Image (tube, rainbow, N blue to C red):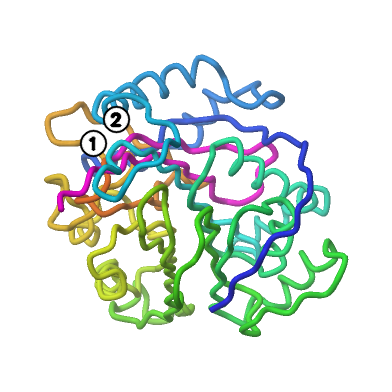
């Protein structure tokens, strides 16, 4: 188990963002909305956080729906295990593309000036959105240490999944640290959970097996992983997980491992699934009448409600990043895709709100 404490440091730099409504599972092709549509809404808003018109549209529809279901805003008042219903849980997931991508656009865009902004911008987003659970994929371990300075009241759990990105991680990020840091598992490239609650027991760190044939016979198969930790989310003990899978690892494999680790605990599962919402491989995950699974997704549309066009979570115009939660324990309350200025990855942060259901004893 790797648990890192956080040093206290003041952080005054605000996170400059543009907010878009995140995509729901809908008819095929809906998640392929283009960046042009998203960018046209965001033009000119580069200097002051969130547009009031956009916030009114998203907050009014989603927030009102969530508050109505939960019986009004409950804030952070203490509640016991049986009476935990209505507690709002804010979750963030972000593929940070810290050690380059196939097209080389991440390292091209990650100038030193942008890398120096990275930790303060991401920490600012976590603080301003009052995030309880944050997950990161394609992360360098040096970024863990950069976030420690900004988030003294959060715990972090690391899972190194590859040594291959180590040289790029060292070249791109280590120069921003005052002292040299070595990953506890010797792997500089991986994924992480950032948790407001304490971590209980041993986290689960698992390398995933290849259980699906690659799209091309000559395709390079990269190692993929899953990280889970037991923690307290609001008033309830829960399991939080992050994964990053490609076409050679099935979502079914992931949820089966999570189920064995979590047992009957509430689950929040987030990360980069590299699949569009309508992909049949997500059917074992989705509940709410959208599939055969046991999970709700923060911006899934319940049966009978109007579908909305999916906002992409990648620069290339795809929604492939998700925040799932066990349907028995959470209601979805909407999500937002955050467009950072400047861009810090080829993905965009996805932030969602879940409403905790009262558990029947």
Residue at 38% from the left image edge and 60% from the top image edge: 273
Q: Is residue 33 visible?
A: no
Bounds of the magenta span?
Answer: 332-361
Q: CA distance from mark 1 to mark 2?
A: 8 Å
Q: Which residue is mark 1?
A: 301
Mark 2: secondary structure:
loop
Does the magenta-highlighted stretch encompass residue 339? Answer: yes
* Occupied quadrant, residue 272: bottom left
Pinpoint residue 248: horizontal percent, then vertical percent: 35, 75
Q: How many marks?
A: 2
Q: Is residue 104 above or below residue 216?
A: above
Q: Residue at x 54, y 74 (%)?
A: 159
Q: Residue at x 66, y 76 (%)?
A: 188
As drawn, the residue found furthest toward the right would be 178
Q: Which residue is mark 2?
A: 308
Answer whether labels 1 and 2 touch (C-beta < 8 Å). Answer: yes
Residue 21 in magenta? no
Residue 295 in sight from this viewpoint: yes
Q: Residues within 10 Å of mark 2 (few under 14, many from 20)?
A: some
As rendered, which of 289 and 7 lies closer to the eye? 7
Residue 294 placed where, x, y %?
19, 56
Q: Left or right: where does residue 281 sit relative to residue 193?
A: left
> The residue tagged with tag 1: helix, strand or loop?
loop
């Amino acid at each position: 188990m790797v648990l890192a404490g956080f040093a206290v440091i003041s952080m005054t730099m605000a996170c400059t963002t543009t907010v878009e409504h995140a995509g729901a599972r809908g008819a095929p092709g809906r998640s392929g909305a283009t960046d042009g549509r998203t960018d046209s809404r965001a033009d000119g808003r580069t200097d002051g956080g969130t547009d009031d018109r956009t916030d009114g549209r998203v907050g009014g529809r989603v927030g009102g729906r969530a508050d109505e279901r939960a019986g009004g805003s409950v804030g952070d008042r203490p509640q016991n295990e049986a009476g935990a219903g209505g507690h709002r849980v804010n979750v963030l997931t972000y593929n940070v593309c810290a050690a380059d991508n196939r097209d080389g656009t991440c390292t091209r865009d990650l100038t030193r000036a942008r890398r120096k902004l990275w930790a303060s911008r991401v920490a600012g987003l976590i603080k301003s959105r009052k995030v309880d659970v944050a997950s990161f994929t394609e992360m360098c371990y040096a970024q863990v240490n950069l976030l420690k300075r900004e988030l003294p009241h959060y715990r972090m759990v690391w899972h190194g999944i590859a040594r291959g990105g180590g040289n790029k991680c060292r070249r791109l990020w280590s120069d921003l640290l005052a002292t040299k840091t070595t990953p506890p598992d010797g792997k500089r490239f991986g994924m992480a959970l950032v948790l407001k609650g304490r971590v209980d027991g041993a986290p689960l760190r698992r390398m995933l097996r290849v259980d699906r044939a690659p799209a091309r016979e000559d395709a390079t198969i990269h190692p993929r992983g899953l990280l889970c930790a037991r923690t307290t989310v609001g008033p309830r003990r829960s399991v939080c997980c992050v994964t990053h899978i490609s076409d050679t690892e099935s979502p079914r494999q992931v949820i089966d491992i999570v189920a064995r680790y979590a047992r009957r605990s509430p689950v929040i599962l987030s990360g980069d699934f590299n699949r569009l919402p309508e992909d049949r491989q997500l059917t074992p995950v989705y509940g709410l009448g959208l599939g055969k699974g046991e999970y709700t997704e923060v911006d899934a549309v319940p049966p009978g409600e109007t579908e909305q066009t999916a906002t992409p979570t990648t620069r290339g115009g795809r929604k492939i990043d998700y925040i799932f939660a066990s349907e028995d324990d959470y209601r979805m309350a909407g999500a937002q895709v955050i467009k950072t200025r400047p861009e810090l990855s080829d993905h965009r942060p996805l932030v969602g709100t879940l409403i905790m259901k009262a558990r029947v004893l």
